Amino acid sequence: MQQEKIGIFDSGIGGLSILKVLLQSCYTDFVYVADTAYLPYGEKSPEVLIERGHVVTELFLQQGITTIVVACHTSSATTLPTLQKAYPHVKFIDMLFPTITAACNITKNNSVGVFATAATIKSGVHKTLLHSLKLDITVIEQACPLLVPLIENEHSTKQEINRTLQDYLSPIMRAQADTLILGCTHYAFLKERIKELAPCLQLVCADQEAVLRFARTAETHKKRVTFLVSGDKAIFKHKSEKKLLQDFDYSFESF
């Protein structure tokens, strides 16, 4: 019996880091919604994010999908409770809480840094949840508004990215944090760069935690991914094909 399709959504290519690991372990079909017309989510108001959350959820329901991976920390931080209340029959799987839990388990000196979008940092969700798990933990939050545009822009140079990362890492390093939460799925594509610049930091990233949320299943058919894109479909297709070098069937549609 074929498994139910799994829905994944993000504002752009960040959620591909989640899709990539799930393609390796879950032998089912996926629908990936890329809301690129509203990229980046990190600069949008909560009202806009809630409205987009409803639009995307309804789109998944039209596809018969009731298991949705919220592959966007900003959405998890600002809209998830509203969506869970509005759609009680939908299973929303967020990547936020698993990374926070992992960071609490990993840190040795109770000092954790957080890289996230401006909207996520403004919500204070990381600090609140980390303190709920470890009262004496020190949390150093760093908004990183330039990272998503740099990652989405394939013409960004290594020098530009490294210079920006060094600026954002400085307060984390000054505070002597030993663990860094990459609180945006886009940032998974910068893990190796960050390790080079700050080898003393233990990185916690959603793509590492995503596979733990799903049971590994036996392969029964070639996996298929349907990409639904709100913005320029050709641009997203070009970017995603460079990120996902996997053996699966796929198609791109606009919504």
Image (spheres, rainbow, N blue to C red):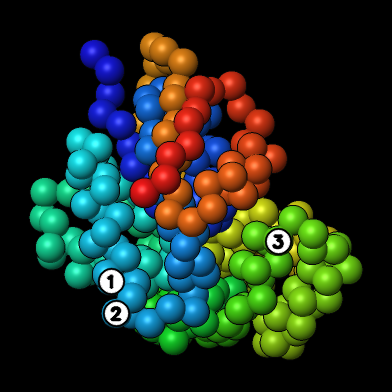
Could you tell me which secondary element the residue under label 3 belongs to? Answer: loop
Few, some or many C-alpha atoms within 10 Å of disc 3 (few <14, some 14-19, many ≥20)? few
Q: Position of residue 230 (x, y in %)?
A: 43, 54
Please tell me whether residue 168 is drawn above or below residue 231 in the rendered image: below
Would you name the residue on which mark 1 appears?
A: 50
Q: Position of residue 238 (x, y in %)?
A: 65, 43
Residue shown at the point (43%, 78%) measured from the top left: 44
Residue shown at the point (41%, 13%) measured from the top left: 221
Q: Position of residue 68 (x, y in %)?
A: 30, 47
Give the amino acid at mark 1: Ile
Near-viewer residue (202 or 110):
202
Determine which of the numbered discs, if any, sits on residue 47 in the image. 2
Residue shown at the point (56%, 67%) measured from the top left: 181
Q: CA distance from mark 3 to mark 2?
A: 27 Å
Please tell me whether residue 147 is drawn above or below residue 253 in the rendered image: below
Q: CA distance from mark 1 to mark 3?
A: 26 Å
Please tell me whether residue 167 is drawn above or below residue 75 in the rendered image: below
Q: CA distance from mark 2 to mark 1?
A: 5 Å
In which quadrant of the rendered view does residue 212 lie?
A: top left
Give the amino acid at mark 2: Glu
